[in-house]
Amino acid sequence: LLSPTWFLSELARHGVTHVTGVPCSYARGLYQTLEGGDWPYLSATSEGEAVALAAGTWLAGSQAVALCQNSGLGNMVNPLSSLTAPYRIPVILGVSRRGWPPGTDEPQHALMGEITPGLLSLLEIPAQPLSEREPDAAAQLSAAARHCAGRRTSALIFGKGVFADHHGPSPREPRPGNGAAGRGRDEPTPVPEALRGGHRPSRGEVMAACLELAGGHAVVATTGYTSRELYRLSDTGNHFYMAGSMGSAPGIAAGIAVAAGPPLLVLDGDGALLMRLGSLATVGRYVRSPFVHVVLDNGQHESTGGQRTNAAGVDFATAALACGYRAAWRCEGIDAARAGLARAVAVAAAGPVLVHCLIRPGVTGTLPRPAVSPAEVALRFRQHISQTIARALA
Ligand SMILES: Cc1ncc(C[n+]2csc(CCOP(=O)(O)OP(=O)(O)O)c2C)c(N)n1
C-alpha cells in the first residue's frame, strides 16, 4: 500500500502546489491526510469545478492535482474537453475506480467501473492504474510531471485500497490560508445594497465600466458573448477569454486567487453562474485576495439565441453573501452599476465581492471571436500573472 504522505510529498517534489477534488471512500487515507494536514487542499463542490480550480492554479503559475471518484468523471467531461484540452492547461487527475473488478461493488458503480479507462481514452487523456509499489508509483508520477511540462493532462486510476489509511492527527478545522471559513456560522449574513439610477445598460456598457474601474485586474470572462465583447473592447494579456466550459469562470478565478492572489475581475453570466452555483461557496470559503465577481444578468442565454434562464427573481447578491462573500450589490441602471463597481473595487482587497448588474439584451454589430488561439490566451495570461506577482514581490 502507498503512504498518502509519501504520495503527496512526491507530488510536491514534482512541483504540484495544490490538490483539489471531491472525495471517494476508495482513497479515504489520501483525503484524510489532505483534510487533516498542512497540504493546500481545496475541497470542490463538483468534480467539474475541481478541474476549473486546477486550471486556475496552472494559470497562476503553479500546478494542481484534481481528485474524483469515477462517478464524478462525467461531471468533469465538459471542462476536460472544452477547457483543459483546447487551452492546453495540464492537470493531473486522480480517479478512484469504484465498480471494479466487476461484481465487487454496488450496482450504481458497475457501468462506470467498466468504462472508466475507455472514457479517459476517448478524452485523449493518458491514464494508468496507480501502482501500490513505491518505485513504480514514483515512475508514474514522474511521467505525469512530464505530461504537465508538455502542457498535457494525464490521469492515475486508484484501485480500492491503493492508499494506506491515515494514521496522523484526525481531521481538524483547516487553518487560515488553508480554507478556514470566512465568517463564523453564528455571525449574521450581511444584506446586499440595492442601487438604482440611470438607463438599463447593455453588456458592453457595463463591461467598459468594469475595465475602467478595475483597470489592471486580471479578467476571467465567461463563455459566449461576454468573452467576445471583452475581446472587442480590448485584447491584452490579462484577459482570459473562456470559450466553452460554461459555469467555470468563478472556479478558474478561485484557483488563480488561491495560488497567486492577483486582483481579479470575473465577468459572469446569469445562466453560467446558475450552472455551477456551488462555486459561490468555494469562492466564499477560500478566496482572501481582491476578487470582484460581476454578474451580467440579462435573464437570457443570449449567446445561444435568447432563451430565458431561471434567473428571474434570483437574488445573486444575497446568495453570494450567504456563501461567505464580503459584500454585494444589486444594480439597476448604468449609474447604479458604476457606483456598485466602484465600491466593489474599493473594498475587494480583503476578499470576494459580487456586483449583480441587470443589463438589457442585445449587442451592437457582430461580435468578433478572439483571433488568438486558446492555447496562446492561456500561456500569455499565465505569463501576465507571473509578472504581476513578481512585480508585487519586488
Ligand atoms: C456546458 C455547456 N452547456 C451549454 C453551452 C452552450 N452555451 C454557450 S453560451 C450559453 C448561454 C450562456 O448564458 P449566460 O451565462 O446567461 O450568458 P449570455 O449568453 O446571456 O451572455 C450556452 C447555453 C456550453 N457552451 N457549455
Image (spheres, grey):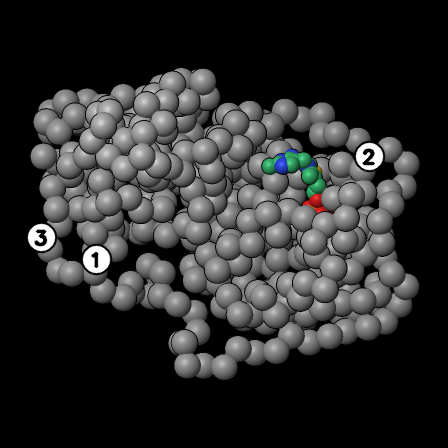
Task: Determine whether label 1 and label 2 are within 8 Å by CB.
Answer: no
Q: Quadrant of the N terminus?
A: top left
Q: How many marks?
A: 3
Residue at 70%, 57% in the rendered image: 311
In the image, which disc is placed on residue 167?
A: 3
**Residue 14 locus on image (x, y percent):** 26, 33
Q: Which mark is residue 375?
A: none
> Which badge, 3 or 1, comes first in the chain's sequence?
1
Q: Which residue is mark 1?
A: 36
Judge by depth and name the residue closer to the eye, 285 or 345.
285
- Amino acid type, callout 1: Gly
Q: Amino acid at mark 2?
A: Leu
Relative image position of residue 263 (x, y in whole percent): 56, 55
Using residue 47 as the reference point, say whether residue 69 is left or right of it: left
The answer, for residue 293, to whether it is visible in the render is: yes
Query: 10 Å neighbourhood of mark 2: few (<14), some, or many (≥20)?
Result: some
Judge whether 226 appears above or below 176 on screen.
above
Please provide percent x and percent y for residue 383: 52, 37
Q: Residues within 10 Å of mark 1 (few under 14, many from 20)?
A: some
Q: Residue at x 49, y 68 (%)?
A: 324
Q: Decide which of tag 2 and tag 3 comes sooner along the chain.
A: 3
Which of the labelled discs sits on residue 367, or is there none? 2
